[in-house]
Image: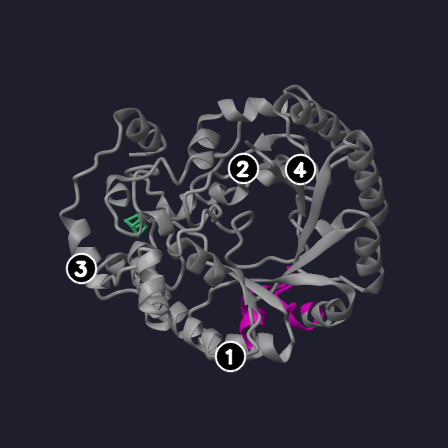
């Protein structure tokens, strides 16, 4: 079921980050959206959510205020929105979150978010020289100083954590030291958006998913070693989730694991859609005619792209079904599997990176645990090269035809 809703309360941004899926990776449909979500739309959404909650026996929701840049949404709208949600669904529990670029996030904003019980996450890309290269204002000026300021204020005001996109040009040590120097208590990493026909800048097309080319795994393993050897390490969700998955826990998200993706996006005009980063596949791929002003929330389950997204760790390419680390990797994030030729019927562009990273962490875990514990957890050593070779001859488990057809339906070939 969908239990997490990303509200695009502002469809414009005060930054112009070079890798942004909304503005710089191929989709311009945001230009047709209202700049801000109206209170009328919030109210309609809350009413629909109330009906959906009763019908499905759901009492707990996550509401993520997102953009564009959500701090462009006026302060009084936040007050009104929270009042509407808590009054309309007065028997439900809400986890309110805001994910912001941090520009303009001052003491007044933190006071408001504390009052409204909204957890604050800030996006940052590491040391100034790198952050300022990618996370820039529309005039090209870097935003590091503003974001650093917002983090420093937030350390005493309950900032939840920092989110970063992996940048291979920053050494893992530089990134780690930056976050340690800022006293950031918790951070998470995202692999860059991109797919086989629009690769992240640092990937070389001819080498992707070849034996000796695993730049993201090499970078992440280096960071893992630094993080693990630090007795006072901050919480790092990305590594923590992988460790839990290797240990057999049923965790995960849209990136890894086998859990269903119960996340839907509500656009500023009330459109209900699949996760917006999927837009980087091609112009308009996420657009449908489902709108909370005219439809019930359940209608999103009829959207064929949403069907693939929510089941994206089950609807996978044949290689993934045969992969020894499938339960950890889950085939990767849906966007990263896309190609014009095969639609979503591919392993992720980070396939070999995931195999190398997961096998490293699994072997490291085995080295650090007593033998009997490893036996109980059914943990066995894995070798990157053995898995890669095994996958080249994979084929024992085939993908059901109806699933393969759904994945291929988005091919442009
Ligand atoms: S590592 Fe590659 S083959 Fe294995 S599940 Fe992930 S994407 Fe699929």
Question: Does the Cβ of the disc 3 residue fall within 8 Å of ligand 1?
Answer: no
Residue 349 or residue 59, whichever sits in front: 59
Residue 289 visible in this rendered orientation of the protein: no
Q: Quadrant of residue 370?
A: bottom left
Q: Distance between the Cα atoms at labels 1 and 2?
A: 34 Å
Q: How many residues crowd mark 1 within 10 Å: few (<14), some (14–19), many (20+)?
A: few
Task: Give percent across and percent down for residue 39.
Answer: 80, 34
Please name the residue that numbered disc 4 is placed on. 60
Q: Earlier in the sequence, mark 3 or mark 4?
A: 4
Spot occupied by residue 161 in the image (x, y as percentages of width and height): 64, 62
Q: Tell which tag, 1 or 2, sits nearer the viewer.
A: 1
339 or 164, which is in the foreground? Answer: 164
Instruction: Please determine whether, in this image, residue 165 is positioned above or below residue 12.
Output: below
Q: Which residue is mark 1?
A: 230
Residue 254 is inside the magenta segment:
no
Local packing at callout 4 (Cα closer than 10 Å; few below 14, some 14-19, many 20+) is some
Which quadrant, please, contains the N terminus? Answer: top right
Residue, x 74% and y 25% (percent of image)?
47
Which-is-in-front pick, marks 4 and 2?
4
- The residue under label 3 is 386
The response on whether ligand 1 sits within 8 Å of label 2 is no
Question: Which residue lies under the disc numbered 2?
Answer: 262
Tag 3 near tag 4, CB within 8 Å:
no
Compute the Cα span from label 4 to label 2.
Answer: 12 Å
Q: Nearer the N terminus, badge 3 or badge 2?
A: 2
- Secondary structure under tag 4 reads strand
Left or right position of 335 against 186: left
Residue occupying image coordinates x 32% and y 64%: 372
Residue drawn at x 40%, y 61% as measured from the top left: 201
**Distance between the alpha carbons at the discs numbered 3 and 4:** 43 Å
Q: Earlier in the sequence, mark 4 or mark 2?
A: 4
């Amino acid at each position: 079921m969908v239990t997490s809703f990303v509200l695009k309360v502002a469809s414009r941004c005060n930054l112009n980050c070079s890798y942004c899926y909304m503005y710089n990776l191929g989709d311009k449909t945001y230009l047709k959206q209202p700049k801000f979500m109206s209170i009328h739309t919030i109210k309609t959404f809350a009413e629909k959510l109330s009906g959906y909650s009763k019908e499905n026996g759901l009492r707990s929701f996550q509401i993520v205020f997102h953009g564009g840049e959500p701090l462009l949404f006026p302060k009084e709208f936040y007050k009104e929105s929270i009042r509407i949600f808590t009054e309309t669904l007065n028997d439900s529990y809400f986890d309110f979150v805001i994910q912001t670029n941090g520009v303009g996030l001052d003491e007044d904003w933190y006071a408001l978010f504390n009052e409204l019980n909204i957890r604050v996450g800030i996006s940052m890309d590491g040391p100034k020289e790198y952050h300022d290269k990618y996370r820039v204002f529309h005039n090209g000026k870097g935003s590091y100083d503003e974001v650093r300021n917002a983090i420093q204020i937030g350390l005493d005001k309950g900032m939840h954590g920092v989110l970063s996109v992996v940048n291979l040009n920053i050494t893992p040590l530089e990134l780690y030291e930056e976050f340690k120097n800022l006293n950031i208590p918790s951070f998470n990493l995202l692999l860059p958006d991109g797919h086989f026909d629009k690769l992240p800048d640092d990937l070389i097309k001819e080498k992707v998913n070849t034996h000796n080319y695993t730049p993201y795994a090499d970078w992440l393993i280096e960071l893992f070693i630094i993080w693990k050897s630090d007795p006072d390490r901050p919480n790092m969700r990305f590594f923590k989730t992988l460790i839990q998955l290797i240990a057999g826990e049923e965790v995960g998200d849209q990136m890894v694991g086998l859990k269903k993706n119960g996340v839907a996006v509500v656009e500023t005009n009330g459109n209900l859609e699949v996760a917006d980063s999927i837009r980087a596949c091609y112009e308009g791929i996420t657009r449908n005619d489902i709108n909370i002003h005219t439809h019930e929330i359940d209608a999103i389950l009829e959207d064929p792209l949403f069907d693939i997204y929510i089941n994206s760790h089950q609807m996978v390419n044949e290689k993934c079904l045969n992969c020894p680390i499938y339960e950890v990797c889950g085939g990767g994030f849906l966007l990263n599997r896309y190609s014009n030729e095969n639609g979503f019927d591919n392993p992720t562009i980070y396939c070999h990176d995931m195999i190398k990273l997961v096998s490293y962490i699994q072997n490291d875990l085995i080295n650090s645990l007593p033998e009997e514990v490893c036996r109980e957890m059914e943990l066995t050593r894995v070798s990157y090269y053995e898995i890669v070779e095994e996958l080249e001859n994979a084929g024992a488990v085939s993908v059901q035809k109806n699933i393969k057809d759904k994945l291929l339906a988005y091919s442009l070939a």
